[in-house]
């Protein structure tokens, strides 16, 4: 790179940090780290009515949890701060004043009703929704004497001009100024709008590359016009593909566009979500899907980002999260699972069996997809399960057959020594079952112990569960059958 790489993410604190914004932050972060540059977090909070400090905190917390650490931000500060737009109003006012004084911007004195009527007419006539303002050539001094409640500041867009730029992902893109018109850049001298403020911030913060979602492509020609008028150097542009659902429709809240913190609460690991988001529109050029943070930093490139939409597949995320869960040490996994266990298992029960916790969680580790599943999966170790007696029935077994099966299991377990391994348990049961249908014995036993259709094998469970507890569970099951 000829100049230092400086990239930014600029979320608005009008809602929580969603996957789309987090993916954009991640790509900016990886690009910066690949070239030893700076990743900047800027908060666009000029929409004072909708901005909320709780959402700003959500943004900070979500990025920190993912391990996307900013080099400059409202929290860390930096050479080109402040990093909240609400604290930069004086800067915007200075540049707005310059554009007005130079005649590159002007006061539009149309009322909202007039603008709405014009829009309806253009739509009816199937013409571009471009407003060419009759006030664009009114001298500034004259316009200032006529300012009322209905006015905005617009940029004076040149007629018949092609605005061309090269997108790193999409190649050369061209726009006709006749389709843009005189666009708004501020509600008033003290209230800048997005397209204006972002240009000022990027220039003042020495942003070298703007990496953002493709929904911003239409904003780029407006921003380029402002840069030319203000004499700013143009950054490089890369517009990321949209994130789509598996049916290729735009991602919605029901299809995965929940907040990053929601994924944390559901039991996804940050390194798994980091890895998953990195593959939403980019790949390393081979079949690998599990890549460490360091591998992603070293191998990421804008040139390998696809143009077409990136598919958000929750099934793939679940699989990937399971892979990362299996990499955890049992000790670490216990610590991660405890908050979820505490939600459904009484603390005294957890404490009373804490010596078994590592063994219990290790049993489920190969099957877990999310940490939040752990409570439902292992609660039978801590309390008597609730289930319907019909669940005890294997195929067409009669009640008498079920009772006989449970009695047979009871007899085998009664003979167990206090410490017995899974291998020894399996050997004893298979010796008793012989060549018959194993489900006749093992299905009623599994249900009696766990109350579930799906669980680890009874042999694995009995290796952990106290003999007296197992016998009590079988006795309860027998009572269900005769009730």
Image (spheres, helix red, strand yellow):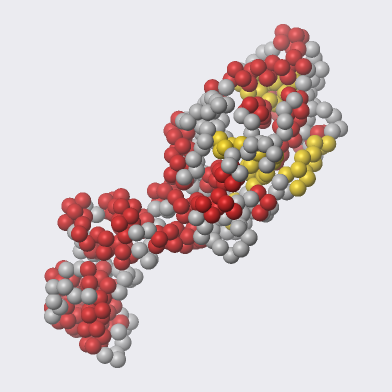
In the displayed image of the protein, which residue is found farthest to the bottom? Answer: 435
Q: Is residue 45 above or below residue 189?
A: below
- Point out the image quarter for the C terminus: bottom left
User: In the image, is 285 to the left or to the right of 114?
Assistant: left
The reply to whether residue 413 is in sight is: yes
Q: Relative to 357, is 289 on the left or the right?
A: right
Specify whether residue 398 is in view: no
Q: Position of residue 213 (x, y in %)?
A: 63, 44
Q: Residue at x 69, y 16 (%)?
A: 97
314 relative to 469, above or below: above
Question: What count of labels does the image hold?
Answer: 0
Lateral position of residue 360 relative to residue 232, left or right: left
Q: Position of residue 237 (x, y in %)?
A: 69, 41
Pick the front one: 35 or 277? 35
Residue at figure coordinates x 50%, y 28% from the top left: 77
Residue 249 lies, in percent from the top left, at: 61, 54
Quadrant containing the N terminus in the rendered view: top right
The residue shown at (54%, 54%) is 295
* Occupied quadrant, residue 464: bottom left
Camera-nearest residue between 362 and 54: 362
Q: Residue at x 31, y 66 (%)?
A: 363
Q: Is residue 474 above or below residue 97?
A: below
- In the rendering, at what x and y percent does residue 322 appear? 43, 61
Question: In this view, which residue lies farthest toward the right?
Answer: 160
Left or right of 295 in this view: 414 = left
Q: Toward which corner of the image does residue 370 lie, by quadrant? A: bottom left
Indicate the quadrant where residue 396 lies.
bottom left
């Amino acid at each position: 790179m000829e100049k230092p790489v400086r990239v930014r993410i600029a979320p608005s604190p009008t809602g929580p940090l969603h996957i789309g914004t987090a993916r954009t932050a991640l790509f900016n972060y990886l690009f910066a780290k690949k070239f030893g540059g700076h990743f900047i977090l800027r908060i666009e909070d000029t929409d004072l009515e909708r901005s909320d400090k709780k959402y700003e905190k959500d943004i900070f917390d979500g990025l920190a949890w993912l391990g996307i650490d900013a080099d400059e931000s409202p929290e860390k500060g930096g050479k080109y701060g402040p990093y909240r737009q609400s604290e930069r109003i004086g800067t915007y006012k200075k540049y707005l004043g310059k554009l007005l004084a130079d005649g590159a911007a002007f006061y539009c004195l149309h009322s909202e009703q007039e603008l709405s009527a014009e829009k309806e007419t253009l739509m009816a006539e199937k013409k571009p929704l471009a407003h060419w303002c009759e006030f664009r050539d009114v001298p500034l001094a004259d316009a200032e004497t006529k300012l009322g409640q209905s006015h905005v500041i617009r940029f004076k867009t040149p007629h018949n001009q092609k605005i061309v730029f090269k997108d790193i992902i999409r190649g050369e893109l061209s726009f006709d100024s006749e389709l843009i018109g005189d666009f708004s850049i501020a509600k008033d001298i003290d209230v800048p709008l997005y397209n204006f403020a972002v240009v000022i911030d990027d220039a003042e913060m020495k942003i070298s590359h703007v990496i953002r979602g493709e929904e911003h492509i239409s904003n780029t020609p407006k921003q380029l016009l402002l840069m030319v008028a203000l004499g700013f150097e143009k950054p490089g542009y890369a517009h990321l593909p949209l994130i789509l659902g598996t049916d290729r429709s735009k991602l919605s809240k029901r299809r995965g566009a929940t907040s990053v913190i929601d994924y944390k609460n559901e039991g996804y690991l940050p390194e798994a979500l980091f890895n998953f988001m990195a593959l939403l529109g980019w790949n390393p050029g081979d079949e690998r899907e599990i890549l460490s943070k360091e591998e992603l930093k070293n191998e990421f490139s804008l040139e390998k980002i696809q143009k077409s939409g990136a598919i958000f597949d929750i099934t793939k995320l679940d699989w990937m999260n399971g892979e990362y869960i299996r990499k955890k040490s049992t000790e670490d996994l216990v610590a991660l699972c405890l908050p979820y266990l505490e939600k459904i298992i009484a603390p005294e029960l957890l404490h009373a069996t804490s010596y078994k916790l590592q063994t219990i969680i290790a049993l489920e580790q190969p099957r877990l997809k999310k940490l939040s599943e752990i409570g439902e999966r292992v609660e039978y170790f801590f309390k008597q399960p609730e289930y319907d007696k019909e669940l005890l029935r294997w195929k067409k077994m009669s009640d008498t057959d079920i009772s006989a099966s449970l009695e047979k299991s009871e007899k085998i377990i009664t003979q167990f020594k206090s410490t017995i391994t899974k291998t020894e348990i399996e050997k004893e049961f298979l010796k008793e079952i012989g060549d018959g249908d194993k489900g006749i014995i093992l299905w009623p036993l599994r249900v009696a112990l766990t109350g579930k259709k799906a669980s680890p094998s009874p042999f694995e469970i009995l290796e952990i569960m106290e003999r007296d507890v197992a016998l009590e569970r079988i006795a309860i099951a027998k009572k269900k059958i005769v009730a």
